[in-house]
Image: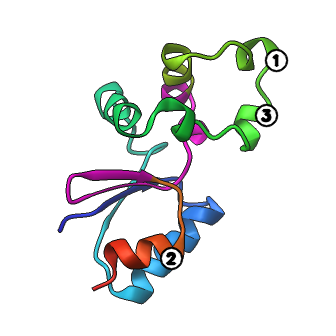
């Protein structure tokens, strides 16, 4: 199974997820969404699979710094535009593996999903 882990290298949750994968011996490819970019079609696929509400990280600093006018009345199109403009607003990590997509890290869920 080819796994791709999308995130930002200095994100604490991404660091935890990578340490967990390394500790379990799970191979993956890391994709830095800031440095390596993120295309609109891939983001749309994640939105289709998870919903923009699940994907948008409202708790993060980047989102909280937005003016209130931008935070209010969000819909799928405006949330997608924000996430494309500032990938730090995406809940991390996003993992593509075996035809599925997930966002966030939970050792218990990942153990059931990825550990051999």
Return the mark for residue 64: 3
- Residue 59 located left or right of residue 109: right
Secondary-structure class at tag 2 = helix
Neighbourhood count class around disc 2 (C-alpha, 10 Å): few under 14, some 14–19, many 20 upward:
few
Residue 69, magenta (yes or no): no
Q: Does the magenta stretch include residue 86?
A: yes
Query: Which colour assignment does the render follow?
Result: rainbow
Residue 36, percent across and down?
A: 38, 44
- Disc 1 to disc 3, C-alpha distance: 9 Å
Task: Please identify, in this view, whether the residue under mark 3 or under mark 2 is nearer the observer.
Answer: 2
Residue 108: numbered disc: 2
Who comes first in sequence, dot 1 or dot 2?
1
In the picture, which quadrant includes the C terminus?
bottom left
Q: Give the range drawn in magenta.
A: 83-102
For the N terminus, the quadrant is: bottom left
Residue density around tag 1, few if under 14, some if 14–19, many if 20 or more, within 10 Å = few
Q: Residue furthest left?
A: 1
| Left or right, 34 with reference to 1 | right
Closer mark to the observer between disc 1 and disc 2: 2
Q: Name the residue under label 1.
A: 68
Q: Which residue is drawn at 31% across and 80% down?
A: 26
* Residue in the image at 56% along x and 33% along y: 53
Residue 29 in the figure: left or right of residue 52: left
Compute the Cα span from label 3 to label 2: 29 Å
């Amino acid at each position: 199974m080819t796994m791709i882990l999308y995130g930002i290298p200095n994100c604490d949750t991404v660091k935890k997820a990578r340490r967990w994968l390394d500790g379990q011996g799970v191979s993956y490819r890391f994709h830095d969404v800031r440095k390596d970019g993120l295309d609109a079609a891939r983001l749309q696929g994640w939105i289709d699979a998870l919903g923009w509400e699940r994907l948008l990280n409202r708790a993060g600093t980047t989102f909280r710094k937005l003016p209130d006018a931008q935070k209010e009345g969000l819909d799928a199109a405006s949330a997608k535009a924000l996430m494309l403009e500032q990938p730090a607003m995406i809940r991390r990590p996003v993992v593509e593996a075996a035809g599925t997509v997930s966002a966030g890290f939970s050792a218990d869920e990942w153990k059931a999903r990825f550990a051999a």
